[in-house]
Amino acid sequence: MSEGNEIPAGQNGPDEDEWHAFVQAHAASAPAPGPLPPKRRWPRGALAVLLLAGLAFVALKFIGSPFDAGVTAPTSTEAEGRAGAKSAAPSSPTGDRPMIPLSEAFPAQVSDGAGGTFTKVGAVVLKSCTEPDSVGPALAAALDDSRGCVGEQVALYKDARDNQYNLALFTLRDPEDAVRLVTRLGMAFDDYQVGAQAPPRGSGLRVLPPDSGMVQSFTSQGRVMAVGLGQWSDGRVGDYQKLVDSLAPLLKEVSDRAARYETAG
């Protein structure tokens, strides 16, 4: 599969250079420094989960250091959940259809619905759906057991306060696999399987410390499983519902774009 990457128009200078450096490093056969760190340890619990009509939102409290990038591990095991119905499937078989174009999936800016804006730092198509530094072993195994995965696309956004939002889109060949994966990830309270990117130097964003808090949300739209991650700019632990609410409009916009692409004739 060919790879693609992009920098939003008008974002020049060190940020652009760093993002292209990340893409080149990621494509190289030998490990190299970049925004996706090479080592990961997996969290052990979830704070809360809601599964409803193919849409899951999971708030996770994190400590520990799975990624040098600041992905951290949850300690709370309190959870509640409800399995829901499947999301809408495309009107015709689309298993071999390409992924949504990167620029269509991840717009340069997204309204937060409250007068603010999310700004894209960068986006990239990964080499495969099971890159070891982007997914955990359980998700990789589930993807291998599926009817196939077309590809994974990731993007990093920031808001006006420099809070960080990572998005990952997995395009499966079968829409039922997308629903199953969202349900599995949402209900697996003791596991955490999708990784965040570290911001490139020059982006104005901090590389957050390993004890930073984080929230995570999931949706499925046709063949697409969307995963959103949110972290406060200072990496603080707490205010998780507020962070979930902040992430929601960005994830919804990207999910809606995937849904329109998936259902297009």
Image (cartoon, rainbow, N blue to C red):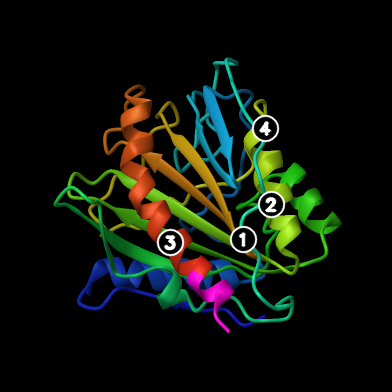
**Kind of element beneath mark 4:** helix
Q: Are marks 2 and 3 in contact (CB under 8 Å)?
A: no
Residue at x-position 37% and y-position 66%:
122
- Disc 3 to disc 4, C-alpha distance: 23 Å
- Disc 4 to disc 2, C-alpha distance: 12 Å
**Kind of element beneath mark 2:** helix
Please count the marks in the image.
4
Which amino acid is tagged 4? Met
Question: Of the residues tagged 2 and 3, which is closer to the observer?
Answer: 2
Mark positioned earlier in the residue sequence (2 or 1): 1
The image position of residue 151, as x and y in percent, is 65, 69
Q: Is residue 208 above or below residue 110?
A: above
Mark positioned earlier in the residue sequence (3 or 1): 1
- Disc 1 to disc 4, C-alpha distance: 20 Å
Left or right, 93 with respect to 126, comes to: right
Q: Are marks 3 and 1 in contact (CB under 8 Å)?
A: no
Which amino acid is tagged 2? Val
Pointer 4 residue: 187
The image position of residue 224, as x and y in percent, is 61, 62
Question: Of the residues tagged 3 and 1, which is closer to the observer?
Answer: 1
Q: Which residues are magenta?
A: 260-265
Pointer 3 residue: 254
Pointer 2 residue: 179
Pointer 1 residue: 88
Which amino acid is tagged 3? Val
Left or right, 86 with respect to 246, comes to: right
Seen from the viewer's position, the closer of residues 243 and 43 is 243
